Amino acid sequence: MTAASPPEILRAPLVVEFPFTRSLGPVQSAFLTGLREGVVLGVTTADGKVMVPPVEYDPVTAEEIRDLVEVGTTGTVTTWAWNGSPRPNQPLDTPFAWVLVRLDGADTAILHVLDAPGPEAVSTGMRVRVRWAAERTGAITDIACFEPAGDGETSAHAAPHSGEFTDAVTGIVAEARLDYSYSPGRAQTAYIAGLSEQKTIGERCPSCHKVYVPPRGACPTCGVATTDRVEVGPAGTVTTYCIVNIKAKNLDIEVPYVYAHIALDGAGLALHGRIGGIPYDQVRMGLRVEPVWTEGGRYPDHYRPTGEPDADYDVYKELI
């Protein structure tokens, strides 16, 4: 008899994204509003240094600082790195250089991009200038990029600025997005393949003998690989739980409902799942439950009571 071949390791594209909304203090508000108006502002620290972009608290003394100054729109490249393959949503869709630019009148550098024909056209110490975006809204992208400056463009000094503008920018929405290819690895691939057959597969540590569900491929306590696969459940015990009273977006479940940690029979730790088939206020620690699968479901839809007597606390207290 030949052994069954292991399932092919799973891999899939994954995107994690969310918009983060934040309000702006007076310094950041002035900085972004200034960009909208074609003005670059910095802030003067207690020791007289001009920081661009500005911060609201002195990095040395931690005191609040409000002394705004206007700096030049030309500057000097202090360091750089070439990007020959721009990614989607980066400032330029053609190859460019990431640069740190110390603007004239500033003592710190600002990170942005330099539009250049190739790495041979970029050097530390080169003079550059701001290229403003055609439409400006009060964001760092109002600086479309930097570009090489002409020989006749002179440096500027920092000059005091009130920071006052009409219709100031008071808040921003920062779009956070992460695109990557995710692979659950050998152990969790077997776990997911088991779920497709309505089985829950864990792996046992050869040293401490704890059964991990979902399996991790190695025991985090002993540091050894786990290869001995064990089917656990399907029934289990509620070890602890919470009552959910706020409806989640895109989740078609009426509140209140119960989410619980469930120690499946034979498992060395609890996994989480929703409890159904019982009023939320009758869920309790020690309740014996079993999975409910929907047709074509890739994992249990919820867990419901088995009708067995509650488990004794001593049986599951180490799994809480």
Image (cartoon, grey):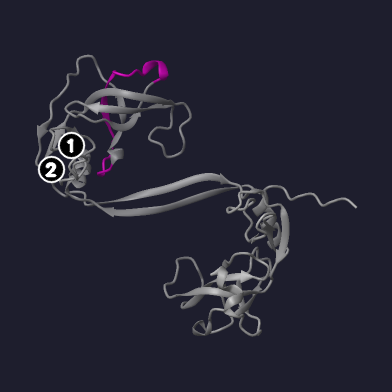
Q: Nearer the viewer, residue 86 or 236?
A: 236
- Callout 2 amino acid: Gly
Labels 1 and 2: the sequence-earlier one: 1
Q: Quick one: label 1, few (<14), some, or many (20+) residues within 10 Å? A: many
Q: Residue 97's quadrant in the figure? A: top left
For mark 2, what is the residue?
Answer: 163
Residue 132 image offset from top left, x and y in percent: 26, 33
For mark 1, what is the residue?
Answer: 41
Q: How many numbered circles are shown?
A: 2
- Callout 1 amino acid: Leu
Outermost right residue: 1
Whether the residues at callouts 1 and 2 have beta carbons within 8 Å, the answer is: yes
Which region of the structure is painted magenta? Answer: 117-139
Q: Residue 119's quadrant in the figure? A: top left
Q: Residue 100's quadrant in the figure? A: top left
Q: Is residue 318 left or right of residue 155?
A: right
Residue 275 image offset from top left, x and y in percent: 56, 76
Secondary structure under the numbered disc 2 in the rendered image: loop
Q: Is residue 199 visible?
A: no
In the rendered structure, find residue 254 and report the number of the disc placed on it: none
In the depicted structure, whether residue 94 falls above or below residue 152: below
